[in-house]
Amino acid sequence: MERADIMQYLNVEVPVKNMPVLDPEFIPINLFNRAFLKDAKKPVSFGVERNDGQVAVCHTFIHGTPEMRDADIYYCDRLVKSILWMKGGWKIYVSGDERVFSALKAAYCVGGSRAFDADFMAGVYEKPFEVVLCEKVPEEKGASQAVGRHLGGCRIGFDAGGSDRKVSAVIDGQPVFSEEVVWFPKLNADPDYHYNGIVEALKSAAEKMPRVDAVGVSSAGVFVDNRTMVASLFLKVPKDEFDKKVKDIYLRAVRDTFGEDVPVVVANDGDVSALAGAMGLDENNVLGIAMGTSEAVGFVDENGNITGWLNELAFMPVDASPAAMEDEWSGDIGCGVKYFSQDGVIKLAPRAGIELEETLSPAEKLKVVQKLMEEGSEQAEKVYRSIGTYLGHTLAYYYDLYHCKHVLLLGRVMSGKGGDLILAEAKRVLGDEYPECAGNLLPALPDEKARRVGQSVAAASLPEI
């Protein structure tokens, strides 16, 4: 779909000053939203309810005219999906427009375009997913909690990634040992493969300390009471085996290795990346973004607390183009995982003229592009510069949503010269196109060692002894 055809479909003209050199169809979703809202006057409201009666609320506008029907529904679909994956929830309230309600209800049913989202959320919150029409959406209600920053004693921090696992031994806040091991959790259906890898890592760190006082785990996925509710690491594990062996896999691994008395805390790797940033900066109001196998995001608020939000921005739309690339897992288009992970690099490499052998794993494909970047390849530079352009536009969107002050960029995609170029380009786009972010939003990279193992060290601080 050409850009002119896209604009005709959306019925909204979206001016973009800074375009990714390898993606001329890219439409930053925040700029699309601003252009759409310019002449929208009909009020609509959405509420998304999550655990413990917490509700996220959004009041906005649509056009409400026949010629803007498709654009209205597209805007509301993208907006509600953004709220859902930022805050989490099992119930959507719609007020103000029956057409929008009907479209969302059809999308979030079995066989609908958002069936994946509905099924995912139902699994996380263990409630049937609902979309309801109401006269007035409920009031906003949230909760936050203090977590981490416990440094005393002999601790293990374990970071479970999709391509490698990292473990650190930490004594009184100082790492005395860190190790990275390649593994392939997404390709293995046997949960014992995952369990044995976790135990092996824990034992490796334990050997470097006189005792183990606590274990903190950073892992991709959604966790409730230290239990794995949903996680892409266990994508191939059958449902019955997941329920029997994966939901409590981290608790079981620690208990079997060190006994019942060693406390363990399991947290989403995005939240741990935000915690790592807050600890490193000695500040709060930090958004952490880990760009690795996926895009993992976490947030430490202005009080230094974790919000309890889902923060699964890998599934949040960042590209409003109807021609955007589809995510194989969710079946949706334009979502963060295809822009801010190794998938983003792999997507752009062929457009830059870089051939990647199909037999290579995603992590190995990333390494090919990274090596070219270190060697000064102009093709690799186009890849990283395009990701930086994506990031500049998207950070402005995240700023609108989170009102964060600091953004810490972690993960293997941000390693080396490529990460430096991504950051520089993102800052340039922010400064050129989003003056409201100047001096208020501060993206940064940690040093190289912290980029690679910072999350496992921060994870070690999660449990209170």
Image (cartoon, rainbow, N blue to C red):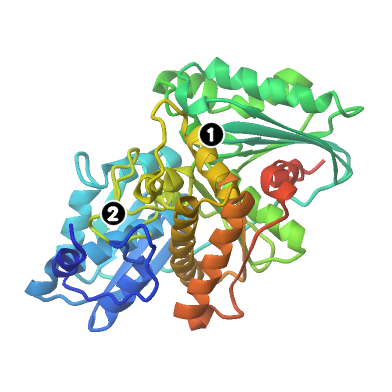
Mark pair 1, 2: CA separation:
24 Å
The residue at which mark 1 appears reads as: 162
**Mark 1 or mark 2, which has the lower sequence index?**
1
Estimate how packed mark 1 is, as few (under 14), some (14 to 19) or many (20 or more) residues with alpha carbons within 10 Å: many
Q: Give the label on residue 324, or none.
A: 2
Quadrant placement of the N terminus: bottom left
Task: Name the element at disc 1.
Answer: loop
- Residue at coordinates 71% horizontally, 41% vertically from top-left? 456
Rendered view: 49 above or below 460: below
- Where is residue 32, by image quadrant? bottom left
- Image location of residue 461, percent across then percent down: 77, 45
Q: What is the three-letter code of the residue carrying label 2?
A: Ala
- Residue 341 location, x and y as percent? 48, 47
Name the residue located 57 percent from the left edge and 42 percent from the top edge.
371
Residue type at mark 1? Gly
- Identity of the residue furthest to the right in this view: 210
In percent of width and height, residue 282 lies at: 77, 63
How far across and how far down the image is residue 185, in percent?
Answer: 52, 26
Point 85% across, 46% down: residue: 173
Q: Quadrant of the C terminus?
A: top right
